[in-house]
Image (cartoon, rainbow, N blue to C red):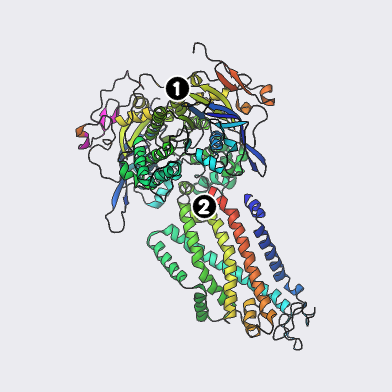
Amino acid sequence: MLVWASLGANKGAWVGCAIIAVLVTMALAADLISPHSPYRQFHDAMLRPPAWQAEGSWQFPLGTDALGRDILSRIAHGARYSLGIGGMVVAMAMVAGVAVGLLAASAGGIVDMALMRILDLLMAIPGLLLALVVVAVLGPGLINVVVAVAIVLIPHFARLARATALAELAREYVVAARLSGAGRFSIMFDTVLPNCMPPLIVQATLSFSAAILDAAALGFLGMGAQPPNPEWGTMLADAREFILLAWWVVAIPGVAILLTVLAFNLMGDGLRDALDPRLRSA
Amino acid sequence: MKLLEVRNLTVRFPTRRGWIHAVENVDFDLDAGEVLGIVGESGSGKSVTMLAVMGLLPPNAQVSADRLSFDGTDLLALDGRQRRSIMGKQIAMIFQEPVTRLNPCFTVGFQITEMLAAHETGDRAQHRRRAMELLDAVGISAPEARMRAFPHQLSGGMCQRVMIAMAIACQPRLLIADEPSTALDVTIQAQILDLLIDLQRKRGMALALISHDIAVIAETAQRVLVMYAGLVVEEQRSPQIFTGPSHPYTAALLRALPDESIGLPRLPTIPGSVPGALDRPSGCVFGPRCAFADARCRSARPELVQSGVALARCFYPMARPEGDA
Amino acid sequence: MTSAPDATPVMRVRGLRRHYPVSDGMFRQKRMLRAVEGINFDLHAGETLAVVGESGSGKSTLGRLCALVEEPTAGTIELDGADIARMPQEERRTLHRHVQMIFQNPFGSLNPRKTVAAELEAPLRFNTRSTPDEWRVRVEEMLVKVGLRIEFAERYPHMLSGGQRQRVAIARALMLQPKIIVADEPLSALDVSVQAQIINLLMDLRDEFGVSLVFISHDISVVRRLAHQVIVMYLGQPVEQGPVDAVLANPAHPYTKALIDAVPKVRRHPASERIRLVGDMPSPLVPRVGCIFSSRCPSVQISCRSIAPALEHVGDRLVACPHTMQIDPSCST
């Protein structure tokens, strides 16, 4: 449809898509790409630089970390964690957020006000701090990181869903649907929600990158995936002390995070541009 | 010398599927002090024609004409500064939906005085006085108070009067009114149209009135241009055009008015619908919907020809009914 | 246009009012927006009642009240004898199959993400027990009736022209064979040539289905064509009400006269006087003293500003103006 055409025209979105495609392939085919197991420690090859450096070798294309683990393998497997975390967080936040937003929009009155004030409260707390608090309560670990970051993102989805739902509810075809005999739920999910999707999709794409960053930050603080799991943020945490000695242990996971976030942002921007004119005309 | 001369005006837009001709081969003149009515349905190109004259089309529009001159000045050859000195000062334009056309962030008084400051000399106090005179001239009571109002605080009719005040501020020689009353209530519409004609007469302005409502044109215009699918299909003086239309489209349009078919059980309709810009028929644009079309109409596009007192783009222009002047 | 034969009216409305409280800020007292004030009418089977007025007249609100989209503040609406105005929400939902609505904006009234078929099936889906195949048959039947080819069923609204969308809206309204259809300015957004087609369509369908129409419009010439009875509204109140031919050919109330005269005509009667109203419509929020039209009436008198006239029988109609001249049948606009 029209959307694909406009998306196709956006160069940034192409780049973003390409990078994401590479990442997904990497995550899915991690076992195939990795020269070694991400957990195997080579005690005679600790802190080896990447292959293009003087002391590097192609046995470890991106070098090794302080425990002699191959960085390329860890990056490839780490992609699974990052994409997985991003996906789960966004899915959770979107489902919960949209449900809350639609409830607020359709209920109105006191319910709406109460829900919005709770969300305001959540949004007033800095994201990372809130996530830390939740993880501190629930304990460190991957699932808890997902829950924590999802909670941070829920208010954004909820507000967006509520705003678009309120606009949609004022449209004449909603009145027409009611006259056709549709009940409240049917109107919400059949009629209103599909028309709210475009901005929500854009929000989801952009939230992906926020989710990855927050998860990496939590990992860096030691609250996320526990070692020896090759999550990129945890890799950064392990490498803190070696920043001056062995830059590649820090830089390469960092670049991986950077590229992923960039890719999703480009995609999100492209999607927003592609979907916006249709929003305006619809 | 004619005030506005347009010869072979064509406006086209590039799209992914090729060029869209919004307006093709449009010719017309406008004399000083004359009221010209341009009537057409959606897609007829009536607004685009006048926007092209004003230079208000989006940058991707391609405007070409053999002649597009105002008072002897070639409008196509103007640079930005020269154009700005003419537009607003000698040619002014008012639009549909007046409330949205005014800047919501500034008071009405500010917007009028800004207009005056751009084109005329004088200090702020003089401009303020002029602005109040103008508001009075367009029939706004208590102009002092109205000057301080914001557009959203005024009614549609009031906003349109403000727009008219801004338009006539610099004594333009030509006023273009693009559907000025369409978004307004009927009683307000009547007031606005009366105002326009009154101002036109008092100030000797030429008025180009664009409307989809043929009755509005009938009550105001001296000469009428009928447009269809980007082409001028008929040009004739009023009221003769309404008693003896020359082009089948004009005739069909008049017959389709509910008031014209009082005794009939059903309204005569024009079958089909206006062709989109990309599916214009080869041959006469109105051919597919015309009751009188034949093979010639389907294969060749007619030129604008003289038929009695009218100009009609038709191979078989209609004759005047007997007994009419 | 002759009236339908006398029988129990399909819809009977008495004393209908709709007020909206409007807050003036948190600490000021709420003001009342009197959108509809005191409407009475009987609508018979097959009859068309036109509601005419300008913006702020309350005609759209009246339409929404009749279609049970909103609940009235006061008054009764009887459908086949039963008062439905204040039924609970759930019961009201079942009444929608008797009263349907067509809207002004053809694009806005169709869900942009639903195909024509999905849109037309919805009323059947929610109200009948038939199967999807049966729905499909009905949808195709209805498409043909409104003059669209069957392949339009798979199209989306943005692939249709304004006239085609309005035909879909009409088809949707007829799916449940309602007794009454409220049409809120269904022609205003259409080109003149398309308007004529839709008017013909409405007339044909009205005859075929025997449905009553509440036709809301500001377009006098269309009303003259379609309606049997007319109510002229100003600021929420009825100012004149009666048989359409009589009222439009020979208006009694000064507002009706001004309204009819203001409509531009291709052929104007040489002897008709030009009546022009002065000023704008007053705000509906300001409480009124005396006649609501007194601020703009060209024939206003001193008593008009203090005494609010009631709607009274004058000849063949109801008029809210004590100063109407004797209605002279030889006059015409």
Q: Percent x, y for residue C284?
A: 31, 44
Asked if labels 2 and 1 touch by Cβ distance under 8 angstroms, the answer is no
Mark number, residue B262: 1
The amino acid type found where label 1 is placed reads: Ile
Magenta part of the protein: which range?
C304-331
Residue A70 in the figure: left or right of residue B248: right
Q: Main secondary structure of the magenta part?
A: loop
Most foreground residue, B79 or A52: B79
In which quadrant of the rendered view does residue A76 lie? Answer: bottom right
Mark number, residue A191: 2
Most foreground residue, C80 or A15: A15
Residue A183 visible in image = no
> SS at mark 2?
helix
The amino acid type found where label 2 is placed reads: Thr
Query: In the rendered view, would you say A258 is above or below A141?
Result: above
Check if residue C327 falls in the magenta segment: yes
Q: Percent x, y for residue A127?
A: 51, 72
Query: In the rendered view, would you say A124 is above or below A195?
Result: below
